[in-house]
Structures are given as structure tokens and as C-alpha cells.
Image (tube, helix red, strand yellow):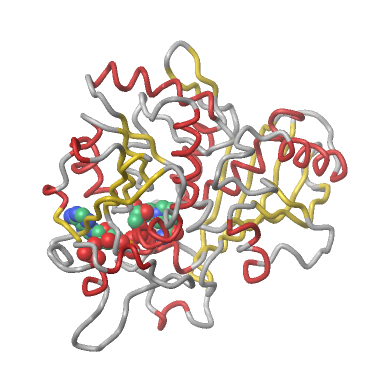
Amino acid sequence: MLRAAIIGATGVVGQEFLVSLNRHSWFEVKRIAASERSAGKKYIDAIHDKNTGIMKWHQRDPIPEYVKDMIVEPVNDIKPQDIDLVFTAIEADDAKVIEPRFAEHIPVISTASAFRNENDVPILIPGINDEQAELINIQKKNRRWKGFVVPLPNCTTTGMAITLKPILDDFGIKKVFMTSMQAVSGAGRTPGVAALDIFDNIIPYIPKEEEKVQTETMKILGTLNNGSIEPAHIKVSCTCTRAAVLDGHTETVFVETEKTCGPTEVKKSMLKYSENVSIKGLPTAPPEYIYIHDDPTRPQPRLDRNMNGGMTTVVGRLRKDPVFENGIKYVVVSHNEKMGSAKGALLLAELLKEKKYL
Ligand SMILES: NC(=O)c1ccc[n+]([C@@H]2O[C@H](COP(=O)([O-])OP(=O)(O)OC[C@H]3O[C@@H](n4cnc5c(N)ncnc54)[C@H](OP(=O)(O)O)[C@@H]3O)[C@@H](O)[C@H]2O)c1
């Protein structure tokens, strides 16, 4: 059993980590940390607002028993020698300082964006670009670290990159246009999205999101050559919006391919990829990596985000795009907190353990 610490355990993603790691067969949560606001309190008290009586527990699953009486520690009290790996669920500015302190000694699996653009850091989606994990060895050497930092992508990149990969492999990709309708939980609790702004509304701007999706997609779908990743030669353009949905990001994706392909071929390609995906058999892996609906009213976030515990990427409305000479378009739903963050990070940890990086 590997001993894990969760940094940011009181937040939206941190809570998902606590639930996902409950009774996990490979990892055990030994330490939890959050900001100075929560440090020193029992977990159950840290998420309880004494003035209002409100429990800041965001999950549909109940608070796991094992964590209720654990003390939330200040990050500096957690010593790398007492644990085997760290999961981080904190904002990028904090992650920039905190993650290297652990990575000097032990592996850090991150949901933050702090290191995603560094040349010696791969952005891994388990099942999509596992071979880029080799960059970990170069990162350790470059930085003289015993551990490493490996981030997941932004949760908006995840569903799109997963569905683009089979298309790229089988038909080649020139251009991608995407519009997202992102869930409110994706903004976390701080700063979060005010009900007054989002109710009965769509907000057409999410700071820094579009740039992240564009660069991360090209890096993830790129190739590892002589110790660095050459980004895929794909032009990616997107509009990221926030919608009045609790969980699950919905995206409309338009792809210009190199070779001609129709919906039947693309469906076959995605299903073949899903059947042969590398992560099969890992404890958190879903039985279906990609699922495709023929019903034209699907996927919908409310109906599809929780498929296989939120770990399946759900596609629908696959059809030919009439604007591109060779083009395909579809809709995808991906759970931002499950495959898109904590549970995806856990699946990544399982993959890295299987590959002997942990
Ligand atoms: N929400 C999503 O769907 C999603 C998806 C993918 C990636 N992410 C990424 O995951 C990270 C966490 O997001 P979130 O939505 O969970 O945010 P959140 O709900 O605002 O939670 C932030 C957490 O960080 C803690 N924290 C704040 N300052 C800290 C410090 N200096 N040292 C240690 N802990 C500190 C907070 O503790 P207190 O409670 O004590 O303030 C809280 O536990 C972000 O980088 C975000 O971009 C989020």
C-alpha cells in the first residue's frame, strides 16, 4: 500500500480525491493539507462553517468515515519522507511553490496548471499519451529530483483530446474548432461562479481557458522525440463558455481531417480505440473508455456525466461536416471532476505505478 497525501483536501477536487481514494486497494490517504484557514482543524470541522451551520461538502457521496477526524495540516508540516506520493488540488500559484518542494523527493500528481507548459513535464491523460511518461526520467535528471511533477490537463481539454486521438491516428487532423459549455463546478469554490451570474445564463468567457485547451491539446497529441515533445501540427481554435450545469463539460467539436472519413468510420475508430485502450484492468479504469450514442439527443451532461463513475467519455451526434472538404463533427460530454480531475489523477497514478514510476 502506498501512502498518499492530498494537498487542497477541502476544495472541490480535493473532496473528490477523498471519495475516490476511499478503500482504494493500492493507495491509502495518510495526510491531508489545505490553507491556513483550515489547518489545525479536524476535517469535519474544516468544511463546516460554524457561523451559518453550512457544510461545505460538494460531493453526492457522503463524507468518507476515514477522513472525518483526520487533522488538516499546514502543507509545511507534511514531510516527504512520511509519504510515498502527493496528489495536489490547489490553484496554480500555490502549486508553483508547493509542488517542487515535494517533487524534490517524491512523485507529485497534479490537477493544477503550474507546470504544464514546462518542456520536461508531460501532460498525461491515461490511455492517450502514456508513452510521454518517459519524459519523467529527463525531468528528474534535469532538476536533480528524486520525484517528479506530472499534471493532468485542464478538464476542458480531457474529453476533446480523448476523442481526437483515434481520429488523429486513423485519419490525420488539420484543424479543430470547439465550443465548450462548461459546468459550474469546474470553477471550484474559490473564486467559483456566483449563482446570480450563472442562473438562467451562459457566460461566454472563462479567463485563460481557451489558451490552455489549445496548447495542451497540441502537446498531449504531440510526439516524444529526443527527450522533448513536438506538439502535434494541428490548429486548434475554441470558445469556452460557462453554462448553468452543475457537473460535466459539454463540447461541440468540428474536425478537419487529412483523409476522408464519415461518421461510421469515425465511430468504428473511436470504439476500436476504446476496446484496446492501455489502461484496461486498472482499478479506476471504466469498462468503456469512450461510449457513442446513436440517439441524436445525447450526450447530455445530466444523463451522461456519471457513466461508469464519471470515467467514460461520452460522444454523440457524429456527423459529416459540410464546410470542410474532409470533416467530421460531434458532441462530447466529460465529467470535469471525475475523469477531468481527481479520479483521472488517480487513474494516472495507477498507470504510473503499473509502469514502475511509483
Ligand atoms: N473543479 C474542477 O472541475 C477542476 C478540474 C480540473 C482541474 N482543476 C484544478 O484543480 C485545482 C483545485 O481546484 P478546485 O476546483 O478544487 O479549487 P477549490 O475548490 O477552490 O479548492 C482549493 C483548495 O486549495 C486549498 N488551498 C488554498 N490555498 C492553499 C495554500 N496556500 N496551501 C495549501 N492549500 C491551499 C484550499 O483550502 P481551504 O479550504 O483551506 O481554503 C482548498 O482545499 C485548481 O488548480 C484547478 O484549476 C479543477
Residue under the point 23% across and 62% down: 70
Ligand 1 lies in quarter: bottom left
Q: Which residue is at the front of the view, 99 or 215?
A: 99
In the rendering, at what x and y percent does residue 316 appear?
76, 56
Residue under the point 59% across and 34% down: 128
In the rendering, at what x and y percent does residue 320 appear?
83, 47
Q: Which residue is at the front of the view, 85 or 64?
A: 64
Residue 251 sits in quarter: bottom right
Q: Is residue 33 above or below residue 233?
A: below
Left or right of 90 on screen, residue 129: right
In the rendering, at what x and y percent does residue 98 appear?
20, 43
In the rendering, at what x and y percent does residue 259 appear?
80, 29
Quarter that holds the C terminus: top left
Can you name the residue that lies furthest to the top here?
Answer: 226
Residue 270 sits in quarter: top right
Q: What is the number of callouts on the image? A: 0
Q: Which residue is at the front of the view, 152 or 67?
A: 67
Left or right of 314 on screen, residue 151: left
Residue under the point 22% across and 35% down: 100
Q: Is residue 60 above or below residue 220?
A: below
Left or right of 105 on screen, residue 171: right
Q: Is residue 116 above or below residue 331?
A: above
